[in-house]
Image (cartoon, helix red, strand yellow):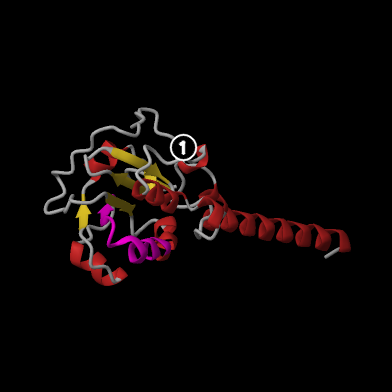
């Protein structure tokens, strides 16, 4: 084998290795930092829009309701769970929290989710409420006020791991509703979908 052929083989091997690494980085990281494509038939649900929560049986609506739209099969949802639980711990006396499962894969039961993620709040399998709130990706948060009107629908944080304190959008929205604000004062990034797209929750 000539030296030239050896160099060609090594170059091809390095090129293939680089392409594999780039693909793995895209698959596991980069794609989740890009906005989720908005569905072609998407209809914006504005703040103040009535949200009928009757389909969520036994959900207590005596306080503002925080709906956590979640898919156990979505990497972004799994990364987000720890942060969601910090909000739950901090605000559980002031809001009623619930998890809404929107995955089309495995059929998880309420008990399975509660045990897997150590939750005591209600867990619902209800894709209809996602459409009603204008949710088209996971994870997403929706806050419904005492009059059952949409106060906030959007992201938890601009950072995948919810580490950017300046973009704690869901927490800012909670603070706004508890301060009796008419609507949260947030930038466009708070309302742009990120994560896994519905209905299959695939990126």
Quadrant (top left, top right, bottom left, bottom right) of the N terminus: bottom right
- The question of residue 95 being in magenta is answered with yes
Residue at position x 42%, y 60% in the image: 80
- Residue 27 location in percent, x, y? 53, 54
Name the residue nearer the viewer: 80 or 195: 80
- Residue 152 location in percent, x, y? 36, 42
Relative to 18, residue 187 above or below: above
Task: Say whether residue 135 is visible.
Answer: no
Instruction: Give the quadrant of residue 84.
Output: bottom left
Q: Is residue 142 left or right of residue 4?
A: left
Q: Secondary structure at mark 1?
A: loop
Magenta residues, start to end: 83-102
- Residue 74 location in percent, x, y? 39, 56
Residue at position x 11%, y 54% in the image: 58
Task: Say whether residue 68 is visible.
Answer: yes
- The question of residue 127 being in magenta is answered with no
Residue at position x 26%, y 49% in the image: 64
Relative to 172, residue 72 above or below: below
The residue beneath circle 1 is 37
Q: Is residue 127 left or right of residue 85?
A: left
Residue at position x 23%, y 67% in the image: 120
- Residue 123 location in percent, x, y? 22, 58
> Residue most toward the front?
179
- Give the number of callouts: 1
Name the residue nearer the viewer: 82 or 76: 82
């Amino acid at each position: 084998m000539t030296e030239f052929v050896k160099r060609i083989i090594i170059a091809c091997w390095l090129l293939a290795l680089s392409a594999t690494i780039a693909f793995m980085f895209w698959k596991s990281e980069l794609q989740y930092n890009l906005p989720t494509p908005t569905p072609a038939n998407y209809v914006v649900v504005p703040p103040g829009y009535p949200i009928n929560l009757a389909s969520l049986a036994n959900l207590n609506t005596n306080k503002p309701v925080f709906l956590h739209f979640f898919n156990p099969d979505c990497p972004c949802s799994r990364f987000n769970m720890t942060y969601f639980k910090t909000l739950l711990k901090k605000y559980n006396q002031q809001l009623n929290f619930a998890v809404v499962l929107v995955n089309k894969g495995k059929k998880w039961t309420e008990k399975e989710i509660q045990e897997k993620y150590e939750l005591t709040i209600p867990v619902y399998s209800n894709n209809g409420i996602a459409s009603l709130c204008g949710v088209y990706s996971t994870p997403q948060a929706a806050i419904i006020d005492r009059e059952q009107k949409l106060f906030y629908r959007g992201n938890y944080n601009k950072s995948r791991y919810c580490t950017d304190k300046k973009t704690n959008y869901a927490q800012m929205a909670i603070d706004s509703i508890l301060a009796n604000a008419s609507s949260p004062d947030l930038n466009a990034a708070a309302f742009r979908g990120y994560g896994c797209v519905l209905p299959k929750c695939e990126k």
